[in-house]
Image: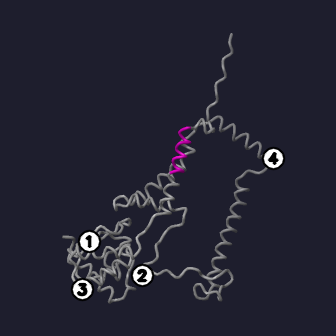
Amino acid sequence: MAAIPKEKPSRVEELRAEFARYKADVKSRGKPFYPYAMFHDTIMSLVVVCTIIGLAVIWKWSAYGPHHDPIHKGLLGPEVDPPADPGTTSFVPRPDWYFYFLFYLLRIFKWPESVFLGTVGVPTIALMLLIGLPFLDRRRARRPSQRPVAMVAAVLTIVSMGVLTWKGATAKEALASEVKANIPRWIKDEHLPANAKPGVELFATAGCTACHTYDGAGGSNLGAPDLTDIGSRNLGVQFQINHLKCPSCVNQGSPMPPFASLGDERLKQLAIFLEASKGTH
């Protein structure tokens, strides 16, 4: 009579057997990873973080001289970057290189209705899939040749991130000089009066088109409204000035930064231009 083949143990039974062997091995030869090794890792991580914070504090408080000052270098060198200036028109903000793929993702989801997908949706879904992968994929095979679907998915992910990183690194943001090239067209399309021309110059150089669009130029990645016909609402010059000085005071919760640093004269010029923008004809 043929012997009855032994039933193959389930995956749960295999995991229980592996855990029992691990516990027996730890008991006979060493200490478990938790809490001993994890405690050592935590202490070392704390030391590294405290060291970095300490060096940053020492550098900041010892580099007391002017920026790029070769004399007052401090203990860890001089400050190499000037203080942040919200009114500058020459600085193009960019993330660190390892965030370039997310940076370019915002260019793909550039419409206000889809910005949420680029900033929260796609990254969150990818992170949840990565966290849940060990629980979703219970196959025992580990050789790449036996995991064609997983290998193709991994290669596509790496290639996609590489392409997005390259595109983000080479992406070109419009500088003030490039935006100013649109001024003649704006004046013609909008039929702007003479008293609005100083304001249109200021609009092109103050960084407004980094968030707003105007007559087909600029970017709306942050969901900022199009200003092509903002003047058709007849809000008034004084309203525009108040809004530019303190956007959150006029519109509660507005993410727009204040531009009070431009000064009353330039704010008035900008407000006159906005109020004169009735739309293209």
Q: Earlier in the sequence, mark 1 or mark 2?
A: 2
The span shown in magenta is 148-159
Q: Is residue 253 visible?
A: no
Q: Earlier in the sequence, mark 2 or mark 3?
A: 2
Q: Amino acid at mark 1?
A: Thr
Rendered view: 281 above or below 106: below
Element class at badge 4: helix
Q: Earlier in the sequence, mark 3 or mark 1?
A: 3
The residue drawn where x is 63% and y is 84% is: 61
Q: What residue would you read off at disc 4?
A: 29
Question: Is residue 69 covered in magenta?
Answer: no
Q: Amino acid at mark 2?
A: Gly
Mark-to-mark CA distance, 2 and 3: 22 Å
Element class at badge 2: loop
Q: What residue would you read off at disc 1?
A: 228
Callout 3: few (<14), some (14-19), or many (20+) C-alpha neighbours within 10 Å?
A: few
Q: Position of residue 203 (x, y in %)?
A: 33, 78
Mark-to-mark CA distance, 4 and 1: 74 Å
